[in-house]
Amino acid sequence: MRKSGGLPFGPMNAGQTSTKRAISNTRIGDSHLWSRTLIPTTREAPADAETPSHVLLSRAGFIRKVSAGVYDYLPLAWRVLTKISGIVRDEMNNAGSVELFMPVIVPMEFYQETRRHEAYGDLLFKVTDRKGNTAALGPTHEETITEMVKGSVNSYKQLPLSLYQIQTKFRDEARPRAGLLRCREFIMKDAYTFHTKLEGPGGLNEAYDAMYRAYSNIFSRCGLDYTAVEAESGPIGGSASHEFMINCASGEDTILKCPVSGYAANVEKCEIGERPRGTFAEPPTGELTEVHTPNLPGIDEVGKFMKVKPDRMLKTIVFQTSNKTPGSIAPDGVKWIIAVVRGDHDVNEGKVKAMSGYNVALADDKAARAAGFAIGYVSPRTVNSVPGTLLLIDSDASLGGFWASGSDKPDHHVKHFNWRREVGAMLDDPARVRVGDVRNAMEGDPSPRSSGAKLVTARGIEVGHIFKLGTKYSDAMGLAVLDETQQKKPVIMGCYGIGVSRTMAACVEMSHDENGIIWPAAIAPYHVLITLMKPDDPRQREVAGKIACELVGHGVDVLTDDRDERPGPKFKDADLVGIPIRVTIGDKALEQGGVEFKARKDTGKGQVVPLADVVQTCLNTLNG
RNA sequence: CAGGGUGUAGCUCAGCUUGGUAGAGCGUCUGGUUUGGGUCCAGAAGGCCGCAGGUUCAAAUCCUGUCACCCUGACCA
């Protein structure tokens, strides 16, 4: 029989009148018994868990998979999420944002004007009601909030406005993976701001900067190691954009940093400093020689076969254009864009778009072949042979020397490609040929912000993203207010997201060891774990109760491991779950009038601390 | 979406090639033992072998279909 008397928590407290008041400036911590909550730890992780956060959160009893990309948050996880949300709320409120709560369900009609259901495509989770009407489970709430503000704000006097919510979001990911890192259902904080101007007090830029600061505070307070980077705004649209990345080798995103200037950017966005470029006057290295290269799918294979290193090959990627981008000075009538980079480099679509002045997409295979491109074997010469083609050459690929390239006919490549000899006078036509930056930045590239400095790469997990949206949604949905001069003006918007559940997972990716999770105190499910060596021993129970009581009075959350287990499993579980401080109460230390104190992040056995000092030691460690 | 793989006990997996109606370890429960880093012993509970068809006297096993899940890539506020 389990004996639970003698400890100041648990069922014996039920029915007692709460002494907490409506207004309070002190927080009383929580005190829970391990045996009375649900922490299903396991020795082995589910077979599908591979990344550390997935394995550890599963094994430590934080999450349980319900279906692909859908998870239960068990009590420990929910406590962490609540703490993260608490910090988010605190900083958002400080930054002048006000919380509200919008429905998960977004009627399809809301997307009629923004056409975003098309942009999202299958990523949008759809539901059908009994009448056959379809709605989306919100992946984000720009439409909903714009619709709502439209109905309640009509004067410049009501702006600026900053609103946020913490909600469950849905995305029907093609491939959910890595546990909580890429889910179909996840918790997110999304904020939206509304303005009549960009600059000055009350303008978008001011709110954007405030959000940037709030985000920095949030991730610092959570105890996370993060980097803010310049980012692409992606399909959500808008101008400026920053991402907040948890620094972590297992991160999915690549970021580049300039160690001198502090510039940091996502690889999608990262600029590259001045690089030398070719003059197109360099002499040929030899006769243009055709090589038969059948059934070789990639640059690496072709290179190996031809005995040419990838950095001496030209990679030619064909894009098709749609409409010109606003403000573009690009020539009219461009149908195709061919981007040429070195074989060991990757074409950056955003840069192709920027340099060409056209919206682009990777060319449709069939259409490109029909137009005369030997897809897989294209050479830059096609700028001459296919009408309406714009050639963009990356600086590194424009240099002289030996080049191998496609030959414009299937199964063949050429050696000794020479820009002037092969492409000819067309190279001098700025309306058809441009040289510049069209590739992804790489480690060692020149920094765009500090001459002489070299970019370094790092990996990160995106947990926050802020955007200057501008009037994209207000224009599309007709959100406008009257200004001082009684003119109707479109409202300028910003939007700001934080992946709350992803932040929890990213934290584990960032902070764990071979034994388990190591939570930063600020978002740990509990601050102190009291481990009872003999839960049935009245003396140990009394000491545990006293310590718990006192800690709780200081706002510390305490979990007491009162399970009738051997020390082995208890210590293993303690390390696995990762509560920052473990206080072990056993005969050994009690004989010396103390208990054993150990910080999770420290290795070794811990130290004996006199009974009278334990609480203070805990507080010092937690606040330190 | 393309390619590959897997569905058997709460978890990890064996059994399938060569059909004969289900196993191990961990976990759970009972009794004993042990008591500062996943004790030891004895016993017990627990499975429509993903689902639906088919072949066969007989299917976890062979065939067909289907669903789910995973990996690589594509995709991705």
Image (cartoon, coloured by chain):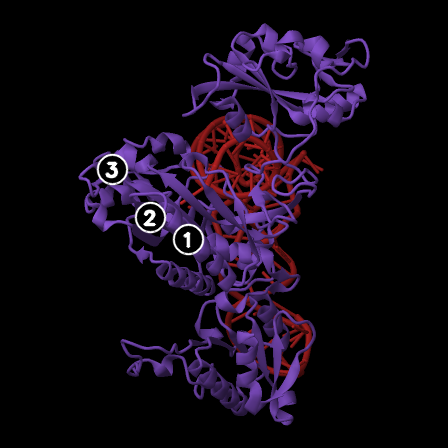
Chain colours: A purple, B red
Three-letter residue code for mark 3: Lys
Query: How far is the residue under mark 3 from the one under mark 2?
Result: 16 Å
Q: Nearer the viewer, mark 1 or mark 3?
A: 3
Q: Residues within 10 Å of mark 1 (few under 14, many from 20)?
A: many
Q: Residue at x 57, y 67 (%)?
A: A578
**Residue B40 drawn above or below residue A614:** above
Report whether residue A45 is seen: no
A445 vs A245, left or right, is: right
Mark 3 lies on residue: A489
Task: Give the image location of residue A149, x and y in percent.
Answer: 24, 45
Q: Which mark is residue A211?
A: 1
Q: Residues within 10 Å of mark 3 (few under 14, many from 20)?
A: some
Three-letter residue code for mark 1: Met
Quadrant containing the C terminus of chain A in the rendered view: bottom right
Front one among A130 and A18: A18
Q: Which mark is residue A193?
A: 2
Mark with earlier residue (3, 2): 2
Q: Residue at x 46, y 61 (%)?
A: A77
